[in-house]
Image: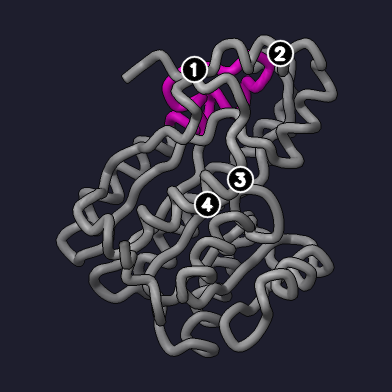
Amino acid sequence: MDLGLSGRVYVVTGGSKGLGFATAAALAGDGARVVLSSRNPDHVAAAVERLGGAPGVVGVPADLAAPETAQRLADAAHEHFGRLDGALISVGGPPPGTAASVSDEQWRSAFESVFLGAVRGVRTLAGRLSGDAAIGMVLSSSVRSPITGLGISNGLRPGLAMVAKDMADEFGPRGVRVFGLLPGRIATGRMRQLDEADPSGRERAVEAIPLRRYGDPEEFGRTAAFLLSPAAGYVTGSVVAVDGGALRAL
C-alpha cells in the first residue's frame, strides 16, 4: 500500500534513539523527509548518518522543554525542505518511582519536558502546518492503566491524552489531525534499563502480553508512520495502543 509519504516533511523529536528513531526510519524509508531532534548533539549526528543524511534527513540538537525548540524545528523544516506536513512528539520517559516517593523537583522537571514541552510542541508546530497534516504524541499504556513504579508517567500521560483529544477538536477544521500512541513493552534502551532495575519484572510482563514477547521498535515506527501518513487521513482524536494486547481496557 502506498502511504503517500513521498516528498512529505516531518519533525520527529526524541528522534536519535528508541521509538522516535524507529519512526524517523520508517518515514524516511517510505520517501518522507525528516527533521530529527534530540538533546545530545552526538546522538543526533549519529542518527542522521544512520538514516542517510542530507538531503533527506537533517538533525537539530534541541531540548523539547526549551520554549524556543518547537519554533526552531518548524523553521528548520521550512528552511531545508520548504514545507511541514506533520510531527511525532516523543520525549524521554520520566524517572521511575511511585507517585508519592518522587520529589517535587522530579515532578516539576518531568512536567516541563514530558507535559508542557509536548503541549507547546504540538501547539507551535500545528501553527506551521498546511492542511492534510498530522501530529502524533508518544504517550504510554499508563494512559489507560497505571504502571507499577512509574508514578510520574501515571500522573502526566493521561492528561496528555486528553490534550491530544482537545487539540484534535480545535485543529480538525483546518485539516490537521492529532492522535496519541500508547506503546507498551517495546525493546528500547529505556525498557532495558527498567528491566535491569527489576529483573523478575520482565518475565512477569511477558506472561501478561498475549503475544508473549516485547515489541520491536520497528513495529512501533511503522505504526506511527502509517498514522502520520495521508493513508490514515480519517484518524484523529484517537489513542492507539501498540502493546501486543497487554492492556485489558478497551
Q: Residue at x 46, y 35 (%)?
A: 242
Amino acid type at mark 2: Glu
The residue tagged 1 is 210
The residue tagged 4 is 221
User: In the drawing, what numbered circle is on residue 203?
Assistant: 2
Q: Which residues are magenta?
A: 140-158
Report how far apart the C-alphas of labels 2 and 3 lie in the structure. 19 Å
Amino acid type at mark 4: Gly
Amino acid type at mark 3: Pro
The residue tagged 3 is 217
- Mark found first going from the N terminus, 1 or 4: 1
Q: Secondary structure at mark 2?
A: helix
Q: Are marks 1 and 3 in contact (CB under 8 Å)?
A: no
Q: Are marks 3 and 4 in contact (CB under 8 Å)?
A: yes
User: Residue 241's spot in the image, x, y percent?
Assistant: 42, 33
Q: Is residue 177 above or below residue 184?
A: below
- Mark found first going from the N terminus, 2 or 1: 2
